[in-house]
């Protein structure tokens, strides 16, 4: 299991507006941030792992998207996947795969894929039966 995942952004305020809205539906909240320094961290509670961080790159070079990288969040039910996808689109995300079954992964894999405003590929998935 991992401790945290970090993705880059070129506009921390835009990223925070997007992820504040998106992750709240999964019970995750911004636990720490400094917008002047360019970072924000999300988790279920303070000092709990795993954590998700969005930040401006430490080397101050432009953030870029990782080819082949997808960050997947887990929803407790399929309706949560649907809400995640709709919320992302309403807050500046772009569709990369509408909510639905992906039986090539396994029979109960229900997921949705999108890009955040910086182009990072993210997913929400439920592994449970309907």
Image: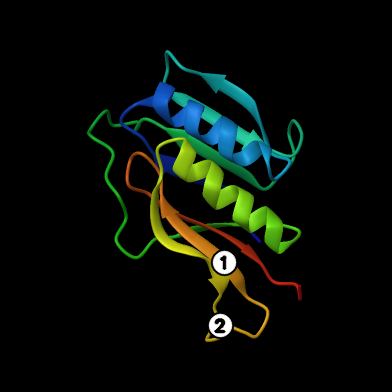
Is there CB contact under 8 Å for labels 1 and 2? Answer: yes
Q: Earlier in the sequence, mark 1 or mark 2?
A: 2
Q: Secondary structure at mark 1?
A: strand
Q: Position of residue 33 (x, y in %)?
A: 56, 21
Q: Residues within 10 Å of mark 2 (few under 14, many from 20)?
A: few
Q: Residue furthest left?
A: 61
Residue 73: give x, y in percent of width and height: 60, 55
- Quadrant where the C terminus is found in the figure: bottom right
Q: Which residue is mark 1?
A: 111
Q: Which residue is mark 2?
A: 105
Q: At which x and y percent is residue 47?
A: 73, 34
Q: Nearer the viewer, residue 66 or 91?
A: 91
Structural distance between the alpha carbons of marks 1 and 2: 10 Å
Side (left or right) of 67 relative to 42: left
Compared to 16, does 89 lie above or below? below
Front residue of this view, candidates 9 and 77: 77
Marker disc for residue 128? none
The answer, for residue 59, to whether it is visible in the render is: yes
């Amino acid at each position: 299991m991992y401790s945290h995942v970090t993705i880059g952004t070129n506009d921390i305020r835009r990223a925070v507006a997007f992820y504040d809205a998106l992750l709240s539906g999964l019970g995750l909240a911004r636990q720490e941030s400094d917008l002047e320094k360019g970072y924000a961290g999300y988790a279920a509670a303070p000092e709990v792992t795993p954590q998700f961080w969005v930040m401006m790159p430490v080397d101050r070079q432009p953030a870029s998207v990782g080819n082949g990288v997808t960050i997947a969040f887990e929803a407790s039910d399929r309706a949560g996947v649907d809400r995640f996808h709709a919320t992302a689109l309403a807050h500046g995300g772009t569709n990369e795969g509408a909510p639905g079954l992906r039986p090539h992964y396994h029979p109960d894999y229900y997921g949705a894929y999108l890009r955040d405003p910086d182009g990072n590929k993210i997913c929400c998935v439920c592994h449970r039966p309907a």
